[in-house]
Image (cartoon, grey):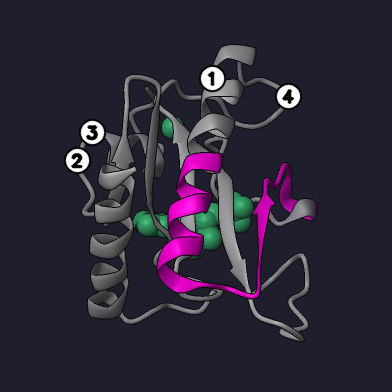
Amino acid sequence: MQENCIFCQIIRGEIPSFNVWEDEDTFAFMDINPVHDGHVLIIPKEHADDVFTVSAAASGAVMRTAQRVARSVRAVVQPDGLNLVQCNGAAAAQSVLHFHVHVLPRKKNDNLALNWGLQPGDMDHIGALAKCIRADLEAN
Ligand code: 5GP
Ligand code: ZN
């Protein structure tokens, strides 16, 4: 854990978040600047900046959770497609230095660039989606 890392603070509950999944090694919560409905971030509880420093155990655990969350996001929002995206370094548009995987639902012809701009979402809507995704994860 890092004192000033925003995602470590989310894990510790010091910053509010719409959580959808937690296990021993990973944490999953809604992105507050969603590209589309159902945009979720998966992080390891163990802090690492990026893919270059994260442990094999933590990255494996994150991918297992990402797969599980992706299935629930697909069930809830029924996107046309879905990317798992992971960014490293400013040029690759990494803005938070705590390793994370985006579960990123896609719409047909959305012309999304890989370095997308951040647009704040509607918190009530994000919270409602979190509830549905959480319920699907608990049921499966
Ligand atoms: P990156 O650009 O580093 O791959 O992605 C970081 C993501 O974290 C962005 O999509 C951004 O919207 C999200 N993010 C940044 N700060 C917060 C926060 O305080 N809460 C949540 N839920 N997401 C955040
Ligand atoms: Zn951290």
| Residue type, label 4 | Phe
Q: Is residue 82 magenta?
A: yes
| Residue type, label 1 | Ala
The label shown at residue 52 is 4
Q: Residues at badges 4 and 1 in contact (C-beta under 8 Å)? A: no
Residue position for label 3: 12
Q: Image point 31% across, 49% down: which residue?
A: 20
Secondary element at image label 1: helix
| First along the sequence among labels 2 and 4 | 2
Mark nearest the camera among 4 and 1 is: 1
Q: Residues at badges 3 and 2 in contact (C-beta under 8 Å)? A: yes
Residue position for label 2: 13
Q: CA distance from mark 3 to mark 4?
A: 24 Å
Label 1 environment density (alpha carbons within 10 Å; few <14, some 14–19, many ≥20): some
> In the rendering, at what x and y percent does residue 92 appear?
77, 52
Label 4 environment density (alpha carbons within 10 Å; few <14, some 14–19, many ≥20): few
Q: Is residue 30 magenta?
A: no
| First along the sequence among labels 3 and 4 | 3
